[in-house]
Image (cartoon, coloured by chain):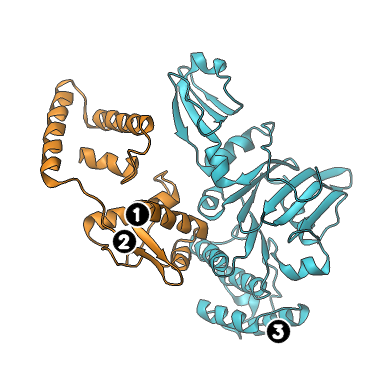
Amino acid sequence: MIEFRLDPASGVPTYLQLVQQVEHALRLGYLKPGDQLPKVRDVVANLAINPNTVLKAYKDLETKGLAVGRPGQGTFIQAALSQVALPELAELRKSLLGWLTTADAAGLDEDGIVALVTRALRDFYERCPGQGGRGGAASGETEVVA
Amino acid sequence: MNTNIIEASGLGKRYGSTWALRECTLAIPAGHVAALVGPNGAGKTTLLNLAVGLAEPSAGRVSVLGGQPAGSPAALDGIAFVAQDTPLYRNVSVADMLHLTRNLNRHFDQHYAQTRLSELGIPLKRKSGKLSGGQQAQLALTLALARRPRLLILDEPVAMLDPIARHDFMASVLTAVADDGVSVLLSSHVLAELERVADYLVLLSAGQVQIAGEVEDLLAGHRLLTGPTAQADRYTAGPVVYTRRGDAQTHLLVRVAADDPVPPGWEAHPVGMEELALAYLREPGAGALPGPSLSGVAR
């Protein structure tokens, strides 16, 4: 079982923070298929948030195919996050490093690169909606740079 | 369609020659935690008192729980109200407060009240006035919830509480929402905290409803545009709620449809509830959104 926390300063909507924390826990192996997510009532009691917010987060996870609600029991993890195959990941990383070298040579500092990548990511997902889905742009941004 | 937990049309209240509330038309559907927000003197407490039946309207009508006239026996049975100053008899013990409330109400769940107080660690023998501020607020809330209301009305419930007591109090309210599906209407100044709590927003300004609606719809219906000041006056795609103008760059908080295109050269950002509320409160003239429809009668 995981514990949720909220970052009031993040600007990320509360329901999305919950979704992202589940996805993050899945990536890091804290959650596995079959694990139960905290009961709505417990999340509400711990974080003092509107029950509809928790329901919305769990519904979002269900829509993504990551969780499934079992009436009277709760919400359970159904699937692991689909990951890009390792060889492809290494290739992507290589081309990204190449791009970063170019950006560095052009005089962009780290903040400049983050701003540019963030902007490009947003434009990309806005132009082709439906491509995002898995992680959501917000959770992906930092990982690209790290 | 859902019933409206509170419905007001043309509602007004005059004290002497001053209108504390004017032409208030409002319909809040059941099942929400609704926040009533506005500056001091905007008419929040007046509206709550009218809904509870503690005050008589000078104009218009207000009904609760799907059409019960405010103050009628059916309305009183289904509503619990905790007033601004957490009213308790200071020299009366917690146990006697329970006893008193049970005898003054037709419905009172003694078992629920005692269980809740023992979970909260509030001793039954202690005098109400000797409890901490947080405990007093929790006692008042327990007395209200033990009546098993369908609508819980709270006037500035956390204004006097420290951060932990605040958090615990709101957690108690929201747990009751999760457990029993009680609808909540609460007034507050603390905008930042409402963002997590409320899913329905009513903004009152100078005695009138400025905007009202589901938070999600309100946020989806607004965005913040950032772009060159030189082009700011040419923005005509929709109503501008609030403008913050710099020499070079201007921020416009605008009302839009979700799929409206962003004007070329401008950047669009989603708005938060606090930002939205502040923008409207700073521009009391900014117009009212059409709220949900009143049941039955035409406006």
Identify the residue shown where x is 28% and y is 39%.
A141
Give the SS element for disc 1.
loop
Q: Which mark is residue A78?
A: 2
- Dot 2 or dot 1: first in sequence order is 1
Q: Please tell me in which quadrant of the rendered image residue A110 appears.
A: top left
Subunit that carries the residue with mark 2:
A
Which sits in the foreground, B223 or A87?
Answer: A87
Q: Which mark is residue B99?
A: 3
Could you confirm whether marks 3 and 1 are on the same chain? no
Give the SS element for disc 3.
helix
In the displayed structure image, the side of residue B184 where residue A145 appears, left or right: left
The C terminus of chain B - image quarter: top right
* C-beta proximity under 8 Å, tags 2 and 1: yes
Residue type of the residue flagged with mark 1: Gly
Q: Is residue B78 above or below residue B9?
A: below
* C-beta proximity under 8 Å, tags 2 and 3: no
Cα–Cα span, label 2 and label 3: 50 Å
* C-beta proximity under 8 Å, tags 3 and 1: no
Cα–Cα span, label 3 and label 1: 51 Å
